[in-house]
Structure formats: C-alpha cells, structure tokens
Image (cartoon, grey):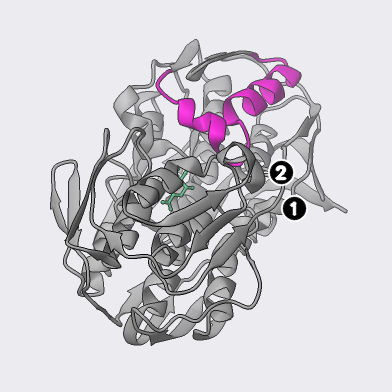
Amino acid sequence: MEFKLQAGGQVKGRIRVPGDKSISHRSVMFGAIADGVTTVDGFLEGEDALCTLKAFQAMGVKIDGPDKGRLVIHGVGRDGLNAPSEPIYVGNSGTSMRLLAGLLAGQKFDVTMTGDISLNKRPMERVAKPLRDMGAVVETGEGGRPPLTLRGGQTLKGIHYVLPMASAQVKSCVLLAGIYAEGETSTVEPAPTRDHSERMLQGFSYPVTVAGSKASLQGGGRLKAVHIDVPADISSAAFFMVAASITPGAELTIEHVGINPTRVGVINILRAMGGDLQVFNERTVGGEPVADITVRYAELQGIAIPEDQVPLAIDEFPALFIAAACAKGRTVLTGAEELRVKESDRIQVMADGLVALGINAEPTPDGIVIDGGTMAGATINSHHDHRIAMAFSVASLRSTDTIVIQDCDNVATSFPNFVELAREVGMQIEKLQ
Ligand code: S3P
C-alpha cells in the first residue's frame, strides 16, 4: 500500500490515538502466565500486539477479544503454557520476539520464533547471550538473526547482567527469564529505558526491586491477575505533536497520553526546540502516568539533542527529524546508533527521504545532522517501517508538492487508524493500493 499526501493541510481538533504498544504486549504476556483472569482496556489492536496475543493462544491460553480494545485473558499460571504445534510467527515485532525469548527460555518445551523481512534482519544475539549465561539453550539464524529457537527443559540460574546497550527489550527479556530461574536475577542499564515491565510486574503482585539503574527480582514467584488500563501511545501521539508544531495555525489536543518519565523525550526535545506543548490533567492510571496534551504551532529552532534524551525518545526520532527539517538552523543528533537496528536503519532511511525532499541531511555513525529548509515533493521508500511512513506523511504539511510514500502496510503494526485520524485533523492523505 502507498500513501499519497497533498502538500499543506491543517492540524486541528481533539483526538485519542490507539493504546500503547509496549504496554499492550506486556499485558498479554503477563496476563497469560498469571493466576486468574486479567482484563485489559485500551489494548492496541495493531498487528504487533496481535502477534503476541496469537502466540499465547498457540500456547493454549484462552483470550477473549480484542473487542473495542477489551481483552479477557484466562491466565494459565507460570507453568501452564503448552508447546505450540508450529513455529510462532511474530511478524514485524521485535518486542514480541525478544520478550518472549526471555519468558519461554525456561519452559519445558522447545519453541521457534520467526519474523517478517524486516525483523529477520534484526539482532537477536543481544538476548541470546544473557539467556545462555543463565543456562538456556538458544539457537539463532545466521549472524545472530531470527529465527530464534529455545530448547526446553533447561534449568535456569539467576544472573547479574550489565546491559551493553540501553534496551528495554533486553532488560525485560532477562527479567522475564529470571521469573523462571533459581535465585536472584538483576539488570543494570547504561541509561534509563522504558520501565513498563518493572511497573506491570509489580501490578501483577510480582516483587521487583528498582534501585537507580538496577532492577532485580527473585525467581520462582507467581503473578496474580489484575485489571489493566492501557494509556494512548506517546509514540503514536508523537506524529501529531510534530504535525501540530510545524503547521501554522495548528492547535490539537491529544487525550489520555501515557507520559511515563522514561518515554517523554519527544516532549522535552520539542520544547527545547521552541515547541508549544501544554501537558495537563495529569493522573495515574493503573500505575502509569497519563495526561492530555495540547500542541500549538511554534517556530522551531535547531538544537544539539541532549544524549540523555535519546533512550527516552528512541522511537520518536523519525518524527523529530521532520521537526528538525522544518526548524531554523541545524539539529545535531549523537549517541543514537540504536536507530540503525530498528524496523529499518532509521538514520539512513530518514536521511535518504529528507534528501529526496531537498533537505540537507547528513547521516553519521551514531546520529544525523539536519539543516532546516524547504521541503519539496518526492516519492519515498519507507522500507517496511511504520514510523518512517508516518513521519514522511507529517512532512507533507510543510512540503511544497505531493509526497508519495511506498510500503505503508506496516503502519498497521502500531497505528491501524493513522490515516483516518490524520484526515480527521486536516491532513490531505489517501491510501493507494
Ligand atoms: C520497546 C523497547 C524499545 C523500542 C520498541 C519497544 C519495548 O526497543 O524501540 O519499540 O516495548 O520494550 P529497545 O529496547 O531495543 O530499545
């Protein structure tokens, strides 16, 4: 599928974007291995989270829904999963593969996980290594990439793992394996990353101790079913935050957005660029902070993005690069080499797209340098990456000509109604089959 965007348009109104992808994945994983019935509201009915849901159904967990964001998960308890009859296909979803690797490493059965063309290029050694250190038997495909096979019936031992990179997926993988391991398992991260696993495990009555950069838990415990209310995904809201920030006359309110402090880099960075974002109605919903956010047009300035904001905005850089292209002056990103191993190489793919639009964008090994300027029209390849497709859609609000974006099917992995909401606020977008 392609997106075609007429140049210009408006960004006005009040919207709610779909549920948080990270929290949706975890709600199914933890609900499945909990004792009792877990109910979930606001679940993201996107392909990635649905892959996680289907994986647990394939392992014998009864899950009703999703029905308008509601799931009822009949937990089977920590040892109640059954061997799937065939390899588990997790599509585009790195979160499914890496977190499931941890959760399944200590089971009695073998399991193989496969992915799509994008996921099959992504590094899995980063989870295989600590799992092997715990005693798991893990096989990867060539070069440490998928498919990933876990051999069942191993005895896992807790480890103290110092993460070589800031990755919530690796941290979560190790902690989930730790539930099935003997003794204590702990992780130390080089910079704060999203802490939804730690928060939600505690919500499921599984004690996790967090002290600074260290998270630890004891193996052998059980999870108790709970109700989960999933906030709207700040990573999806980010496209509309940038859309409103770059569009003269824009004023948009985004409701019920998750503002977990480990996820708010996009707000901090846009504000540092001169963005006008008002965060209000702050409240806590099921252990996660939530707020409404009003964004108005502002003249943005290029900045050197502080490196401590990188893990807090890791999924929002495609959108932020569009903000940088519309800003006055130069924006410099460093310390973001992780962007090269996301659903696509987001540094190269964004640089290529920006250059095609006439922007001076220079990729570096760990970031990018972008000079604000005027964007023309172009045809852009999203490389099967949902966030690249949505970022360049937003660019059309300030381009001088039509933008066509190729390979947009994967937008459905995280934001199935993106086109509808974009049209609702005033963007001129259509789908071409
Ligand atoms: C995620 C963690 C991040 C993020 C991904 C979701 C998670 O990946 O990019 O979209 O749910 O834990 P890394 O942990 O690899 O940085």
Q: Nearer the viewer, residue 253 or 22?
A: 22
Residue 128 - label:
none
Q: Is residue 409 above or below residue 24?
A: above
Is residue 278 in sight in this rendering? Answer: yes
Please tell me which residue is depicted at 52% across the width and 66% down the height of the picture: 44
Q: Examine the structure image and report whether residue 424 is included in the region drawn in magenta.
A: no
Q: Is residue 51 toward the left or the right of residue 296 in the image?
A: right
Q: What stretch is highlighted in magenta?
A: 334-360
Q: Where is residue 111 in the image (x, y as percent from the top left)?
A: 55, 67
Please tell me which residue is depicted at 71% across the width and 43% down the height of the picture: 384
Q: Which of 1 and 297 is in front in this view?
A: 1
Q: Nearer the viewer, residue 390 or 315?
A: 315
Q: Is residue 133 toward the left or the right of residue 391 in the image?
A: left
Q: Is residue 288 toward the left or the right of residue 97 in the image?
A: left
Q: Where is residue 426 in the image (x, y as percent from the top left)?
A: 66, 48
User: Can you identify the residue that label 2 sits on?
Assistant: 384
Type of amino acid under label 2: His
Q: Distance between the residues labelled 1 and 2?
A: 7 Å
CB atoms of marks 1 and 2 within 8 Å:
yes
Is residue 250 in sight in this rendering? Answer: no
User: Can you identify the residue that label 1 sits on?
Assistant: 409
Q: Position of residue 12 (x, y in %)?
A: 56, 48
Q: In this view, does 26 lie above or below 61?
A: above
Q: Say which label, 1 or 2, has the lower sequence index.
A: 2
Q: How crowded is mark 1: few (under 14 residues within 10 Å), some or many (20 or more)?
A: some
